[in-house]
Amino acid sequence: MSCQNKLRTLIADNFVVYFKSHVYHLNVVGPDFHQYHSLLNEIYDSLYEWHDTLNEQLRQMDEMCDTSLKDYADETNFSLINKAKTGKDMFADLTEALETIVAESQILYDEAGIEGHGALETCIGDYMMDVNKLHWKVKSCLA
């Protein structure tokens, strides 16, 4: 699979995780509400900003961005059915989702370096650093 196709999948996965974290932000309840609500806000804000940056990388590779939710649904690695109802389930789901996008980012990062896509390699490196930090914060909530 080309860097462009891997990037498309990452964009779709990033969007799905953005959506999940935003929905979780709206639905989290319990004694740790304020802390969790704020963390989920940080996550979805970050992933939303990365959505734009990742798509700009695609455009710089002379590729058009997807224009429909169906395209994202077809390209994502994630199920679009959400079963997380409790805060613990939400954070467990996000932990797994963030681990997945870090792993796929690493593959894209490595391939971008091999294929000589320096700007993409730098962008994905920065993305991985940010998502790793979010992953650490979410995983810490489950400890």
Image: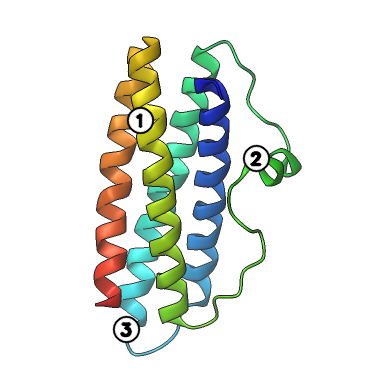
Q: Residue at x 24, y 70 (%)?
A: 140
Q: Quadrant of residue 42?
A: bottom left
Q: Upstream in the sequence, badge 3 or badge 2? A: 3
Q: How many marks?
A: 3
User: How far from the left and from the top, in percent, is residue 47?
Assistant: 43, 46
Amino acid type for the residue under numbered disc 1 = Ile
Q: CA distance from mark 2 to mark 1?
A: 18 Å
User: Amino acid type of disc 3?
Assistant: Asp
Mark 2 residue element = helix
Q: Position of residue 6 (x, y in %)?
A: 52, 30
Please state the horizontal and vertical placement of residue 138, each as a whole percent of the image.
31, 65
Q: Write down the quadrant of residue 141 in the picture.
A: bottom left
The quadrant of the picture occupied by the N terminus is: top right
Residue occupied by mark 1: 124
Q: CA distance from mark 3 to mark 2?
A: 35 Å
- The residue depicted at 57 percent of the width and 51 percent of the height is 16
Classed neighbour count for the residue bearing mark 3: other residues with Cα under 10 Å, few (<14), some (14–19), many (≥20): few
Q: Dot 1, crowdedness within 10 Å: few (<14), some or many (≥20)?
A: many
Tag 3 near tag 1, CB within 8 Å:
no
- Location of residue 138 with respect to 109 vertically, above or below: below
Q: Which residue is mark 3?
A: 32
* Label 3 to label 1: alpha-carbon separation: 33 Å
Dot 2 corresponds to which residue?
75
Above-or-below relation of 133 to 123: below
> SS at mark 3?
loop
Give the percent coordinates (x, y) of residue 76.
61, 45
Per the image, label 1 sits on a secondary structure element best described as helix
Check disc 2: other Cα within 10 Å, few if <14, some if 14-19, many if 20+: some
The residue positioned 28% from the left and 33% from the top of the image is 126
Work out whether residue 116 or residue 47 is closer to the camera in this orientation and state it.
116
**Residue sitting at 52 percent across and 76 percent down?**
27
Of the two numbered discs 3 and 1 in the rendering, the one whose residue sits closer to the viewer: 1
